[in-house]
Amino acid sequence: MVHKTLVDFGDAALVGAKAIVEGLIVPINPNEPARSHVYFHNNIFFSRAVDAGVDTFKISQGDRAARKAASRDANCVGLLHRFDIDGLHNLATVLVDYLGTRLVCQSIVPGILQGEKTHTLLCGSVEATQPLSWDEDMHKLLEENLGRGFMIATRPVPTLPLSDERMALIQELRAVSPGLSGVGLGSIYKEKKTEVIKPLTEVCGPVEAKGIRGSDQRNYILDLCRLTPRDANWVPESEGGTGRWEAVASTNQGNASAKTKKYVPESLGDEEHTMAVFRSELVTLLTHKEMAKYLAAKKKKESNEQGKKDGDSLKASGGDETDVKNKEDNDSTNKIDAENEEYLKSLRLNPNVFLPNIKSLEGIDDEAFKQIKKDEERVREAAAYLWGDVLPTLTLEIRENTGHILPVDGKTLCDTLHQRGVNCRYLGRLAALAIEEEAKDRKAEADFASGTAKSLPRRTMPLCWLELLECEMVARAAKHVLDSYLVENGNAAAAQPAQTVACFLSAILSTDEERAGETELRLKKSGAAE
């Protein structure tokens, strides 16, 4: 029943999105700029995945980051659906990309359109300049479910989380832009002067998340743009990142460097990279690895002490070995469970590290600031595990044909990467590793042909692997370029999408551009043939 409802919701959202892009539905806020228009049709709320302004509380800036944030939110909603958490609800969410425009289609929190008295903000903040709300029951619900299920650590954040520079920019934009609604910073602090605002607020989840109690008295969680930390490999080294990409770009590797240069990002300062986060599968793999290492070390330590404990207990009991052993086994089991649970809790990651426009905890709470630094180091270790362990292991599995996992198309390629906790933004790194493996194979063949080597490797790198990676990169890049063509000049190209798409595909797939003289000659030949 739930599946059928979601399928019907997706069909209705698709019909509504097409009607909106074609101009058949009137927005509910026609006086605001077109990019800020929102729509309500067939009990579905539609909005564009763009950075519409400064009023809404958000961390990332720019249209590219907003587009990626919408994709992350939809992915997190899907993960919550799988967990089916009792007492915590979310909205049906569908993303529709149509003629270069991404629309976010969501169901409605009951009562949210009938005024402030019909719903209650439990946690998070809606306005950019408002302090974070906090509710004990909601926080406990998030901690017991999101914290345990997704390995999310509970950490204090500033109650007014945006940095002073960001707050000053918001105030300035509100002063010069009459179209922006909301009150200024002075009014905010004036309204709150009689209320004591704590400097820190405990948060379990992304700081942008909002918990709302609707008119049906159910708790809803919104804006879950991430459930895992930001990938430190895609954070500039000057801002605390691992510096892996900078090292690859600066390292001279001879001929291999020229081939792999096109797979290295030019800069990590892209606004879209602020939404580059780990996959939940990677967090699960890393947690299993750390727990297995911890349990193995603990078992070895206990086995060394077991002989001495048995001898001391036997002397104290007067020779009743069976009763002593049963009692110690029960006590040991309870103790081990508690210790394991405590260590597992220490492996949780903080999703609010390496975020731009966030106020630092330095000078507010020194202990919390030290904890944030430890969390950042944990995230760097996870990024190093992904770069130095997961990616080379996957390349080796492809080379050795372990498990027969060689993908045959882009869909199976993405599924293979996601199962191992690898995001598709690492296609370039995998291609660089594939080039290195192919270079080793060519060298081995040359050595064998010259007589330097007496044998060839049993396994070689499949040439189709690099070709498949490159095809997927081209297809993904082409999608973004085509979207930019369709939306430029006020969506003028979207009026004739068939012509635009045909010209674009011809430019990509053609081997060379035809000159004017060649065109005339071809037309003359075709006319003469007729």
Image: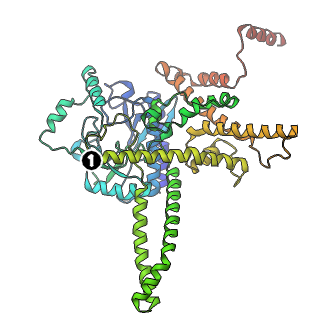
Point 27% across, 57% down: residue: 137
Binning the other alpha carbons within 10 Å of mark 1 as few (below 14), some (14 to 19) or many (20 upward) gives: many
On screen, residue 72 versus residue 363, left or right, reads right
Note whether residue 19 is visible.
no
Q: Amino acid at mark 1?
A: Thr
Of the pair 501 and 442, the residue shown nearer to us? 442
Find residue 483 and report its horizontal and vertical position in percent: 53, 27
Point 55% across, 43% down: residue: 423
Find residue 155 and report its horizontal and vertical position in percent: 33, 50
Which residue is situated farthest in the left direction here? 194
Q: Secondary structure at mark 1?
A: strand
Note whether residue 385 is visible.
yes
Quarter of the image where the C terminus is located: top right
Point 16% across, 39% down: residue: 192
Q: Which residue is mark 1?
A: 201
On screen, residue 458 versus residue 420, left or right, reads right
Q: In terms of image quadrants, where is residue 438?
A: top right
On screen, residue 10 versus residue 394, left or right, reads left
Find residue 459 and report its horizontal and vertical position in percent: 77, 48
Of the pair 119 and 149, the residue shown nearer to us? 149
Q: How many discs mark residues in the rendered view?
A: 1
